[in-house]
Amino acid sequence: MNRPAFLLPLVALAFLAGQPARAADDDKVPYWASIDAEIANLRVGPGDSYRIDWVYRRPHLPVKVLRREGPWRLVEDPEGSKGWMRDLLLSRQRAAMVKDGSLIEMRAKGSSAAAMLWRVEPGVVGLLGECKEGWCPFDTDGHKGFVREEQLWGTGEP
């Protein structure tokens, strides 16, 4: 046997052993996620044999992950519906949805005094940045600005 070929698996194993363990936060629930597919099925149980209760056709819709069971996640949507979804259909990319009510204002900066860029309707979904001092960066189809954190579903602690 060629000595370098024999050592390669041992070197790879030693390298992997020296890597830090995955962050414990990856396993903690609840956490925020978003739908990362054009079509995502919500099932009544954690498996393909369970019936489909709801079909989502809304990429980036925020969901709260409540439980993990193998590759399945028990999620809650902004309307409060709960069910099981495959982990492959979800992303850790944070997103949010404008809460019910009236139009909200998207501003150029995280301040009430900043220029208003757009008015955003309830139900609009967008990608979420890191919220600071009650304001969140919000990007909906390339329209970027800041909105008040309390006007969004998908912010704060899950």
Image (tube, grey):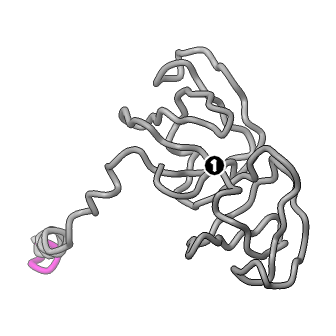
**Residue 148 quadrant:** bottom right
Q: How many marks?
A: 1
Q: Is residue 8 above or below residue 148?
A: below
On the image, the x and y values in percent for residue 77 come to: 63, 37
Mark 1, other Cα within 10 Å: few <14 / some 14–19 / many ≥20: many
**Residue 104 quadrant:** bottom right
Image-based side of 14 in relation to 23, left or right: left
Q: Is residue 4 magenta?
A: yes
Q: Is residue 153 above or below residue 44?
A: below
Region in magenta: 2-6
Q: Residue at x 77, y 39 (%)?
A: 57
**Residue 149 quadrant:** bottom right
Q: Is residue 14 above or below residue 93?
A: below
Image-based side of 13 in relation to 128, left or right: left
Q: Is residue 16 above or below residue 109?
A: above
Q: Nearer the viewer, residue 80 or 150?
A: 150
Q: Which residue is mark 1?
A: 62
Q: Nearer the viewer, residue 6 or 156?
A: 156
Secondary structure of the magenta portion, mostly? helix
On the image, the x and y values in percent for residue 126 come to: 74, 60
Q: Is residue 9 magenta?
A: no
Q: Residue at x 88, y 56 (%)?
A: 103
At numbered mark 1, what does the secondary structure look like: helix, strand or loop? strand
Image-based side of 31 in relation to 148, left or right: left
Which residue is outermost to the front?
113
Q: Residue at x 62, y 28 (%)?
A: 81
In which quadrant is the N terminus drawn? bottom left
Q: Residue at x 17, y 75 (%)?
A: 15
Q: Disc 1 residue type?
A: Pro
On the image, the x and y values in percent for residue 66 come to: 44, 37
On the image, the x and y values in percent for residue 43 come to: 58, 23
